[in-house]
Amino acid sequence: MPEHAHDGPRHDDHGSRGDHAHSGPGARTTGRGDHSPGGHGGHAHGGHAHGSHGHSHGPGGHSHGISADADRRWLRAALVLITAYMAVEVVIGFLSGSLALISDAAHMLTDAASIVLALVAMRLAARPARGGYTYGLKRAEILSAQANGITLLVLSLWLAYEAVARLLSPPEINGGPVLVTALTGVLVNLVAAWCLSRANRSSLNVEGAYQHILTDLFGFIATAVSGAIVLTTGFVQADAIATLVVVALMLRAGLGLVRDSGRIFMEAAPAGLDPDALGDRLVASDAVVEVHDLHIWEITSGEPALSAHVLVAPAGDCHAVRRDLQRLLSDRYGITHATLQVDHLNERPADGELLHIAAGPAPTEAAPTHTYCEAPHGPVHRAAPHRH
């Protein structure tokens, strides 16, 4: 395995008795052999525990091909453009009496705030891991994405209330300035959206800012249509209807951001990845008898991590199995941050008793099982049919 340079103290991977345990970014170990999130509460091993490092940043890892500096440049360009136009739009919106324009300006304010938040979060996430923050501050980007989603939802509720009030009691609106300002806003938002599309949108943080800009673009299109209708027909309710269209777009984008960021905070598996299917695929590998305490989560968007306890047949090669499983996880699932604790099925503790799972079948000499976990987290994957 490749060497890794550490800013902090150097840790010796090898114990004095020749036993070796490697812990990757997916597990945090204690002196008793506990793993979180692996949860192996009472793992006293008389033999050897094999862990694995998942630090390689190849395809499927978190090297996205776009540098953080490049991301920040594109976000700053969009921020300058949006802030300048927002000031113009607020003035014209009040002069023309258009709620649609004012709602667009309010949305552009949240656009600017979302980009500022994204820039701050990127700075925090770039700080190296140290001290108690063993992952660094990478989830600052997810906090930013969630804040962007919540602001979209709150703003959409306020605009919906104002739009309904104007449908019931429509004010006078000057359609000409609304149409011109909205058409100009479409161009401004097209350029801003292009700038953000050049950044790394696999980051939920950048995607949050992009969704703000995109819904604003659609909002300007709706506002331009309403301005044309008011100018040609005098149907002033079109302004409030356009606002409701913007509200619907904001709700859709806001709910998506809150949902996706919430999945990461709740340590859910990445969307589209079925842990049960992955566990069955791991246990189908040569010499693997069982996989339990399988956990899959995201450190931040685009950085999946995995930890699992793998039991190998007595005659199996633990090191070969670990390497094969790591290769499978990287090549097929894009998971390069993986911590695998690999043990032989017939290992015995110091007192010589057979190891077994408390809820499993009774151990026998012919079919030894294990007590690596009193209560395994999640399903226990075996080659035979089993519950998920």
Image (cartoon, rainbow, N blue to C red):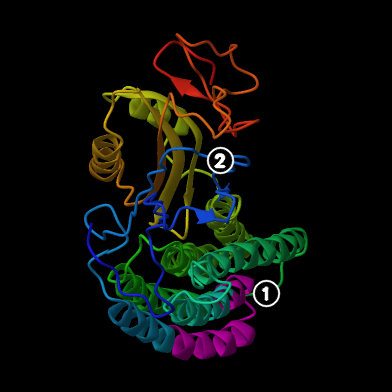
Verify whether residue 101 appears in magenta.
yes
Mark 1 and 2 residues: CB-CB less than 8 Å, in contact?
no
**Rendered position, 114 above or below 318:** below
Spatial CA span between label 1 and label 2: 78 Å
Q: Amino acid at mark 1?
A: Glu
Closer to the N terminus: mark 1 or mark 2? 2
Q: Is residue 144 magenta?
A: no
Q: Secondary structure at mark 1?
A: loop
Mark 1, Cα crowd under 10 Å, few <14 / some 14-19 / many 20+, is: few
Classify 307 as above or below 374.
Answer: below
Left or right: residue 85 versus residue 152 is left
In the foreground, 178 or 57:
57
| Crowdedness near tag 2: few (<14), some (14–19) or many (≥20) residues, C-alpha within 10 Å | some
Question: Magenta region: which residues?
Answer: 82-106
Residue drawn at 47 percent across, 58 percent down: 299
2 displayed left or right of 282: left
Q: Position of residue 205 (x, y in %)?
A: 46, 67
Whether residue 36 appears in this view of the structure is no
Residue 360 position within the rendered picture, expressed as x and y whole percent measured from the top left: 59, 16
The spot of residue 195 in percent (x, y) is 31, 75
| Secondary structure category for the residue under label 2 | loop
For label 2, the residue is 44
Q: What residue is disc 1 on?
A: 172
Q: Nearer the viewer, residue 220 or 60?
A: 60
* Quadrant including the N terminus: bottom left
